[in-house]
Amino acid sequence: MSDDQATPGTTDRATDRATDRATDQATDRAGEQEAFRALLRAQRVWDVPSLPSFDPDAAPATPLELFHRWFAEAVEAGQSEPHTMTLATVDEAGRPDLRTLMLHDADERGWHFASHSTSAKGRQLAARPEAALGFYWPAQARQIRVRGPVVTGSATEGLADLHARSTGALAAALTGRQSEPLSSQAALAEASQAAWERARTEPEAPVPTWTLYVLRPFEVEFFQGDARRRHVRLRYRHTASGWGREMLWP
């Protein structure tokens, strides 16, 4: 027998060690999973002294009025970043996609946001101009869902929106290439530095791909959480005769 040939006993011991390692790893993974579940289930919902009441019969005739009211109340309640929202779109295969971004306005035209037309969401909206928005304000156990078609503003509106924001926002827009593969952090740092320098020296710098989007809602739902799980859901739907309202089971 050559020196490099293992004996049956040696092979068995190596197999046993590999099996033991696999068993230990599986045990560790199971323990980590159970620890995660315990941590997850220990979290409380709406851990605040009290929740506001909401009488849907006293709600205004249009969802925009109620949105403005609830937004102001969220700010007053100390809700962190109430202007952030989740934007849901679909890709070319019909698969849902989402991301968190900032609300830029909410007026009679609709709910406004902005991004590069060349970004993933920009391409998705160009192919299928429909979307949904979600706001979640746990400080008051409130959430709002907005659904509808999306239209683009003019180039002038897009630039006016961008130039009304901070230097950092302009620098981020000038950096561009959103959603494209990144070769290294160094490449990002170099592009970002150049963008910041230009944003400081040229505050009106154009960004051709920056686009203002407006979601024109056909449906807006307001949700008010209740400690006894008697949640209030009020849905507005737009028809040819205007806005209608109805309550939903929670």
Image (cartoon, rainbow, N blue to C red):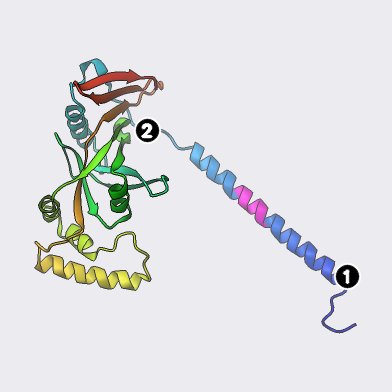
Give coordinates of residue 205: x percent, y percent.
11, 64
Instruction: Identify the mark at residue 98; answer none if there is no mark.
Output: none
Q: In this view, does 227 lie to the left or right of 168?
A: right
**Mostly what secondary structure, the magenta segment?**
helix
- The vertical placement of 5 against 212, above or below, is below
Which image quarter: residue 215?
A: top left
* Residue at figure coordinates x 23%, y 24% from the top left: 239
Q: What element carries label 2?
A: loop
Q: In this view, does 10 lie to the left or right of 34?
A: right
Give coordinates of residue 145: x percent, y percent.
30, 33
* Residue at figure coordinates x 38%, y 23% from the top left: 227
* Residue at figure coordinates x 33%, y 59% from the top left: 179
Quarter of the image that includes the N terminus: bottom right
Quarter of the image that includes the C terminus: top left
Whole-angstrom CA distance, mark 2 to mark 1, is 62 Å
Q: Mark 2 sits on what residue?
A: 47
Q: Can residue 55 be seen in this view?
A: no
Q: Is residue 67 visible?
A: yes
Q: Mark 1 sits on what residue?
A: 8
Say whether residue 5 is magenta: no
Which region is colored magenta? 25-31
Hey, what amino acid is under mark 2?
Answer: Asp
